[in-house]
Image (cartoon, rainbow, N blue to C red):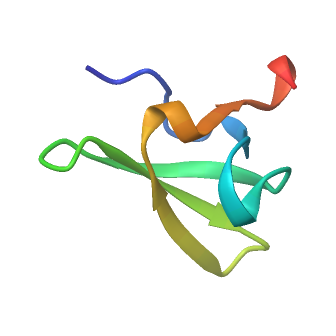
Amino acid sequence: MEKFKLGESVTVHTGPFKGIYGIIVSFDKKREKYLVRFNGQQQLYFSPDEIILWSEK
């Protein structure tokens, strides 16, 4: 089940990327992870419990 929508602004709240702002660009249903784009180029996958909506920060 998808917790976030494509295009939503999120921030990472755990690990080495904590506090970094990004945009949800896709959801991998098989892995149940979100692809988040940072700084326009870098993209990484995160599980739903590793990110929160930017507005909830």
* Image side of residue 30 versus residue 54, left or right: left
Q: Reply above or below: 55 against 26.
A: above
Count the numbered circles shown: 0
Which residue corresponds to the image point at 42% horizontal and 43% vertical from the top-left? 47
Quadrant housing residue 55:
top right
Quadrant housing residue 17:
bottom right
Q: Reply above or below: 8 against 36.
A: above
Q: Reply above or below: 54 against 26.
A: above
Q: Could you say which is closer to the camera, residue 25 or residue 20?
A: 20
* Image side of residue 48 versus residue 1, left or right: right
In the picture, the quarter occupied by the C terminus is top right
Q: Find residue 16 and report its horizontal and vertical position in percent.
A: 72, 66
Q: Reply above or below: 32 against 44.
A: above
Q: Find residue 40 and report its horizontal and vertical position in percent.
A: 73, 74
- In the orientation shown, which residue stands out farthest toward the left? 30
Q: Find residue 44 and report its horizontal and vertical position in percent.
A: 51, 68
Which residue corresponds to the image point at 55% horizontal and 72% vertical from the top-left? 43
Q: Find residue 21 and report its horizontal and vertical position in percent.
A: 81, 52
* Image side of residue 8 versus residue 5, left or right: right
- In the orientation shown, which residue stands out farthest toward the front? 15
In the picture, the quarter occupied by the N terminus is top left
* Image side of residue 39 versus residue 46, left or right: right
- In the orientation shown, which residue stands out farthest toward the bottom? 41
Which residue corresponds to the image point at 60% horizontal and 41% vertical from the top-left? 7
Q: Could you say which is closer to the camera, residue 20 or residue 55?
A: 20
Which residue corresponds to the image point at 78% horizontal and 53% vertical from the top-left? 18
